[in-house]
Image (spheres, grey):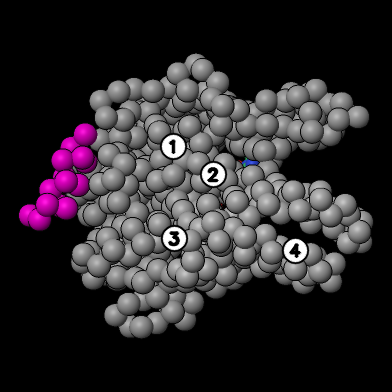
Amino acid sequence: MDSLAQNIQSVISKKSGVTRLTLTDFRNYAFLRMNTNLRPIIITGENGSGKTNILEAVSFLTPGRGLRGARLADIRRFTPAVVEDDYVPSNGSWAVSAMVYKNGEDFEIGTAVENSPKDEDDEISSYNKRIVKIDGQKAVSQGELGQYVSAIWLTPQMDRLFRGGSQPRRSFLDRLVFAFDNEHAKRTANFEHLYKQWYQLIKSTNGRADNAWLEGIEENMAAIGVAIAAARREQIARLNSFIENEPDDVFPNVILELDGTIEKMLDKMPAVDVEDFYIDKLKKERRNVLYNDSVDGVNRTDFKVTYKRKHMPAELCSTGEQKSLLISIILAQTKCQILYQGFAPVLLLDEIAAHLDNTKKEALLDKIKNLGLQAWITATNRDIFQTLKNDADFFEIKNNMVTQL
Ligand SMILES: Nc1ncnc2c1ncn2[C@@H]1O[C@H](COP(=O)(O)OP(=O)(O)OP(=O)(O)O)[C@@H](O)[C@H]1O
Ligand SMILES: [Mg+2]
């Protein structure tokens, strides 16, 4: 066994993950509690029974908008009776709480939406906000969650990740960065906020906004943007060098590349100079806002994946191949987290069997088992998990109730 594999082995013997999950008024669940072990958790049920909702709840133990990228207002449970009576609930809250285990310690994590009273004059204060508590203490930012729990998901929507527009690829990439850099979540949120402010200011004034004001925003955007680009580059480099030593098996080796102007500039000059370049660039980009053209920068960076052995860009690979490439990335990220962060992420694998042939499905289950991961896995059919019969917890959902088998 080489030293890398040995290091991974020593960390995975420590285990990490969710040991208790409690949902309140979350999607189709009025109340749900699941006690879970640090091993694969197989959740089966008919279409619409509530499998993905459970994985989504676990994903809310990490920063961001969960595996569906949902609006907070859609998550609160509603019942047909409520809808029929045309009754608007006065309290739109929902909650997910969990006991998580990491390196021999238990932590209690809770997340919920906090409803600020609606105030006509103040739009900001009437927003629903997701708050996070760690061991009963309100966290300053969602980024703090990263120290206790980490999750990586693979959903049927991601089967098209390499084909459509760049936005979902960019969020996927940024989530890979979060795990190593807790500040990255805050950075991307701040950049998005500044970008909207800048864009609206230019649009609403038809380009005649106060120059000093615009420049102030552009300076902030450039500083945060360069930090975002640098963090993305670091993560891509880390993954590429790790993948070089990975087996090129049913989950083939990949080459990861960033396609973004600011990221590329960081190859050529020091970060402070790139920042000046970006400030200058944003000033020139103002006219693209006015002419409704796309604005270049870290908001447009793309993430390119190549099937190494075949020299084939991911977008030209078959559906099953694309899924295998994604699994390669996810497995490499998982191992990197184990190795460098000292604890394993929880995997959330929705509809695992979709597009995977039997060999690949078995290979994936085998890798999960050998890495000692907690993986929440959904399927409509329990029979495909025969090989995990003695190594997983099995749950079945019926009528909004979850039963352990
Ligand atoms: N806010 C909500 N309140 C109540 N029910 C909701 C809410 N949001 C979604 N649902 C319902 O929850 C049910 C379960 O959804 P979920 O996506 O978890 O099903 P699933 O078991 O994953 O199904 P599939 O096998 O089709 O993927 C759906 O019928 C959906 O309409
Ligand atoms: Mg589903």
Residue 132, x across and y down, in percent: 55, 27
The foreground one among 144 and 368 is: 144
Mark count? 4
The range drawn in magenta is 1-14
Image position of 46 (left or right of 284): left
Instruction: Say which of marks 1 and 4 sits in front.
Output: 4
Q: Can residue 156 be seen in this view?
A: no
Q: How crowded is mark 3: few (under 14 residues within 10 Å), some or many (20 or more)?
A: some
Q: Distance between the residues labelled 4 and 2?
A: 26 Å
**Contact (Cβ within 8 Å) of mark 2 with mark 3:** no
Which badge, 3 or 1, comes first in the chain's sequence?
A: 1
**Contact (Cβ within 8 Å) of mark 3 with mark 4:** no
Q: Type of residue at label 4?
A: Lys
Q: Does the magenta stretch include residue 9?
A: yes
View quadrant of ligand 1: top right
Residue 211, x across and y down, in percent: 84, 54
Image position of 103 (left or right of 289): left
Residue designated by label 2: 185
Q: Type of residue at label 3?
A: Arg
Which badge, 1 or 4, comes first in the chain's sequence?
A: 1
Residue designated by label 1: 146
Which badge, 2 or 3, comes first in the chain's sequence?
A: 2
> Which disc, if any, is residue 283?
4
